[in-house]
């Protein structure tokens, strides 16, 4: 079983981005390998893959739009591309 770590900072507030949703998935979108939320320090603790990953390309997606929307941050002039 492998482990992946990352840390997310909210540069608008200068604080860790605690509670931001994320998902790790194959780039061919065949399914999520893992998902969760960052902890209070903005880290992905316990990001363990359910099974050994097969060879391929993966992407780690952070739901920053949802995070900022939930925090009340105005995103109109922040340079974010927001998926609907």
Image: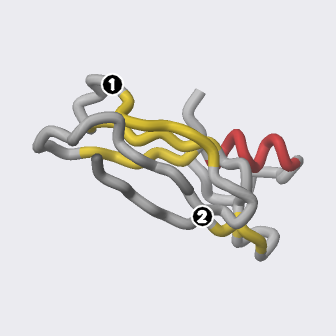
Pointers 1 and 2 in contact (C-beta within 8 Å): no
Question: Which element carries disc 1, helix, strand or loop?
Answer: loop
At 72% from the left and 68% from the top, the residue drawn is 16
Quarter of the rendering containing residue 27: top left
Horizontally, is 4 left or right of 39 in the view?
left
* Image: 55 above or below 29: below
Residue 19 placement (x, y as % from top left):
72, 49
At 71% from the left and 60% from the top, the residue drawn is 17
Considering every residue shown, the one lying at the far bottom of the view is 14
Q: Which callout, 1 or 2, points at the residue further toward the start of the chain?
A: 2
Q: How many marks?
A: 2
Q: Nearer the viewer, residue 56 or 63?
A: 56
Q: CA distance from mark 1 to mark 2?
A: 23 Å
Q: Nearer the viewer, residue 65 or 3?
A: 3
Q: Nearer the viewer, residue 73 or 36?
A: 36
**Numbered label attached to residue 31:** 1
Horizontally, is 46 left or right of 42 in the view?
left
Horizontally, is 72 left or right of 3 in the view?
right
Question: Which element carries disc 2, helix, strand or loop?
Answer: loop
Considering every residue shown, the one lying at the far left of the view is 55
Q: Quadrant of the C terminus?
A: top right
Quarter of the rendering containing residue 12: bottom right
**Numbered label attached to residue 83:** none
At 33% from the left and 25% from the top, the residue drawn is 31
Considering every residue shown, the one lying at the far front of the view is 1
Read off the residue under disc 2: 8
Horizontally, is 53 left or right of 13 in the view?
left
Residue 75 placement (x, y as % from top left):
75, 50
User: Callout 2 environment at 10 Å: few (<14), some (14 to 19), or many (20+)?
Assistant: some
Residue 63 placement (x, y as % from top left):
59, 43
Residue 29 placement (x, y as % from top left):
30, 27
User: Callout 1 environment at 10 Å: few (<14), some (14 to 19), or many (20+)?
Assistant: few
């Amino acid at each position: 079983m492998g482990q992946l770590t990352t840390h997310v900072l909210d540069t608008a507030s200068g604080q860790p981005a605690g509670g931001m949703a994320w998902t790790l998935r194959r780039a061919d979108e065949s399914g999520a390998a893992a998902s969760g939320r960052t902890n209070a320090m903005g880290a992905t603790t316990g990001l363990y893959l359910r099974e050994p990953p097969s060879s391929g390309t993966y992407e780690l997606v952070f739901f920053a739009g949802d995070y900022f929307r939930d925090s009340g941050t105005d995103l109109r002039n922040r340079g974010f591309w927001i998926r609907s």
